[in-house]
Image (tube, rainbow, N blue to C red):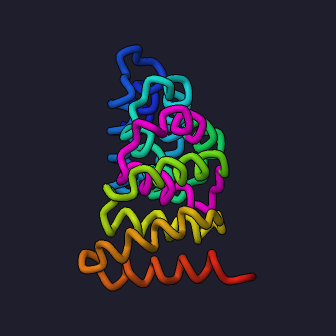
Amino acid sequence: MQRSLAQTCLTSSGFTPMDITNMSWACATLVWEDAPLMDALSGRARATLTLFRPLQLVNMSWACASLGGADHPLLDAIASSALAKISEFTPQEMALMAWSGASLAYLDEPLLAAIAAAALTKIAYFSARDLSSLAWSCAKVLFRTEPLIDVIAAGSVNCISEFSIVGLANVAWSCARLLLPH
């Protein structure tokens, strides 16, 4: 079955971006690390990333992070496509894109800078969870941008009652890690 799935990914002309992301998401959810299938999905994704919508880019990035596999050619291609579409991303998509890279210790500075700039204009729409994820992501890879840290801190105060204890601790840890000298 595994060989037939990989073969289908490689040969089917009707395999859409949604199909690629759904299959990648399913493999990640099941923690099914089938190398030939993931290689086939990665190749198909890289060939069609310009057709992916923001959520599909995020789901591919999330799948890579969830499987713990740093497929750098795919991550680089996802980052490049996301950078071109960052103005279309929702706050949740921005936070998840940053989290996916950070969880793999993958730092794409141009993408994080674009996420930070876009987040500054949409911070009022970030949930407590989005703020926590974005703060943690920046701190994890030591991506310092004081305007974003200030806005995350201010946004956190505005919705402090919505935070879980872990989320609030993540924001506090992130601010300390990014603002204190190392």
Where does residue 47 sit, x and y in percent of width and height?
55, 24
- Is residue 118 in the magenta section? no
Depth check: give the residue in front, 75 or 136: 136
The picture quadrant where one finds residue 20 is top left
Q: Is residue 17 left or right of residue 117?
A: left
Task: Say if 136 sits above or below 98 in the image.
Answer: below
Query: Is residue 103 at all visible to an observer of this figure?
Result: no
**What residue is rendered at 44% in x and 23% in y?**
51
**What residue is rendered at 25% in x and 75% in y?**
162
- Which residue is at the far right? 182
- Is residue 104 in the magenta section? yes
**What residue is rendered at 73% in x and 82% in y?**
181
The picture quadrant where one finds residue 154 is bottom left
Task: Say if 130 sits above or below 167 in the image.
Answer: above
Where does residue 138 sit, x and y in percent of width and height?
57, 65
Depth check: give the residue in front, 131 or 40: 131
Highlighted range, magenta: 79-108
